[in-house]
Image (spheres, grey):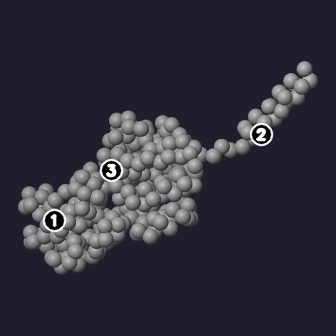
């Protein structure tokens, strides 16, 4: 009897000690991220998995508008990183009715943060055959119908930033499209591909995508032209593995991650 009591006490002590220890993050998470983050997050996901044995980070890279729709329709997602606040706001009930008119409630606002800043860039194909040098020059060429421009569609953040730039110069997008001097991409990678293949004279993309594709950037837009390009990140309320998702979000704010982001043109906004 005494022996059994000693064993039970020992087991209780072990369980008590285990309860007091914080378990290491483990499990599989799915990250929905803007297409412009493909290269960086793929690398950082691999590094995170190596540092945290037992974890697995799966990615779904697409335009932020497409990702927002997928989340709204019930797709499994633990962490969302958008290329603009608009799509994040539309899923965040803590935002007002103007920002979230459908009162969707998918985002955990306590985990939300502005992770990165990017720049909207005017990129040209190899050799820059049209000798485009700036957004000012592009606007003149568009008015004259002498240039073919690739841009993102209206549901894509990079397309929405481009629309603001066109409006800044007093250009009518619909008229340009009817004139056949605009082409569209479903996401920033599709626009980048058109420029890389010299299918267009220039394209409006992010400077980070231009860097990844080895394209020449001839100009970048300032805040007056299209506002700041902010990438917010947040966990989903229904995440099945909150601990690992939080651990990965924390890792994305680390000095190591920040160094990689900065190397391709992002400006980290948190941590370090």
Name the residue located 44 percent from the left edge and 47 percent from the top edge. 58
Residue 19 screen position, x and y as percent: 72, 38
Q: Nearer the viewer, residue 242 or 111?
A: 242
Name the residue located 56 percent from the left edge and 45 percent from the top edge. 54
Q: Nearer the viewer, residue 17 or 82?
A: 17
Q: In this view, does 35 lie to the left or right of 114?
A: left
Residue 175 screen position, x and y as percent: 10, 59
Q: Is residue 50 left or right of residue 214?
A: right
* Residues at discs 3 and 2 in contact (Cβ within 8 Å): no
Does residue 244 appear in this view?
A: no
Name the residue located 29 percent from the left edge and 64 percent from the top edge. 205
- Helix, strand or loop at mark 1: loop
Viewport quadrant of the C terminus: bottom right
Q: In this view, does 42 lie to the left or right of 24?
A: left
Q: Which mark is residue 62?
A: 3
Location of residue 22 (image quadrant): top right
Of the numbered discs 3 and 2, the one sitting upstream in the chain is: 2
- Helix, strand or loop at mark 2: helix
Q: Is residue 13 above or below residue 255?
A: above
Name the residue located 54 percent from the left edge and 54 percent from the top edge. 50
In the rendered image, which residue does mark 1 sit on? 199
In the rendered image, which residue does mark 2 sit on? 17
Alpha-carbon distance for marks 3 and 1?
22 Å
Q: Is residue 123 left or right of residue 106?
A: left
Alpha-carbon distance for marks 1 and 2?
64 Å
Of the numbered discs 1 and 2, the one sitting upstream in the chain is: 2
Instruction: Name, please, the residue furthest toward the top.
Output: 1
Instruction: Name, please, the residue furthest toward the right.
Output: 2
Tell me if mark 1 has few (under 14), some (14-19) or many (20+) residues whose alpha carbon lies within 10 angstroms of its own: some
Q: Is residue 182 above or below residue 214?
A: above
Q: In this view, does 45 lie above or below 30?
A: below
């Amino acid at each position: 009897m005494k022996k059994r009591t000693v064993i039970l006490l020992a087991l209780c002590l072990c369980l008590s000690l285990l309860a007091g220890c914080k378990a290491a993050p483990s499990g599989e998470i799915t990250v929905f991220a803007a297409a412009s983050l493909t290269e960086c997050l793929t690398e950082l996901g691999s590094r995170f998995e190596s540092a945290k044995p037992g974890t697995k980070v799966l990615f779904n890279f697409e335009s932020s508008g497409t990702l927002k729709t997928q989340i709204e329709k019930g797709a499994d997602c633990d962490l969302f990183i958008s290329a603009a606040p608009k799509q994040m706001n539309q899923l965040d009930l803590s935002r007002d009715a103007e920002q979230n008119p459908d009162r969707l409630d998918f985002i955990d606002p306590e985990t939300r943060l502005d992770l990165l800043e990017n720049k909207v860039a005017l990129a040209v194909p190899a050799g820059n055959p049209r000798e485009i040098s700036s957004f000012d020059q592009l606007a003149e060429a568009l008015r004259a119908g002498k240039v073919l421009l690739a841009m993102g569609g209206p549901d894509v953040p990079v397309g929405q930033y481009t629309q603001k730039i066109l409006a800044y110069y007093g250009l009518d997008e619909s008229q340009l499209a009817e004139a056949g001097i605009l082409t569209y991409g479903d996401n920033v990678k599709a626009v980048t591909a058109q420029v890389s293949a010299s299918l267009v004279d220039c394209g409006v993309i992010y400077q980070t995508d231009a860097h990844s594709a080895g394209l020449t950037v001839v100009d970048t837009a300032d805040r007056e032209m299209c506002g700041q390009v902010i990438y917010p990140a947040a966990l989903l309320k229904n995440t099945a593995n909150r601990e690992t998702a939080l651990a990965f979000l924390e890792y994305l704010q680390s000095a190591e991650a920040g160094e990689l982001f900065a190397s391709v043109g992002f400006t980290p906004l948190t941590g370090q």
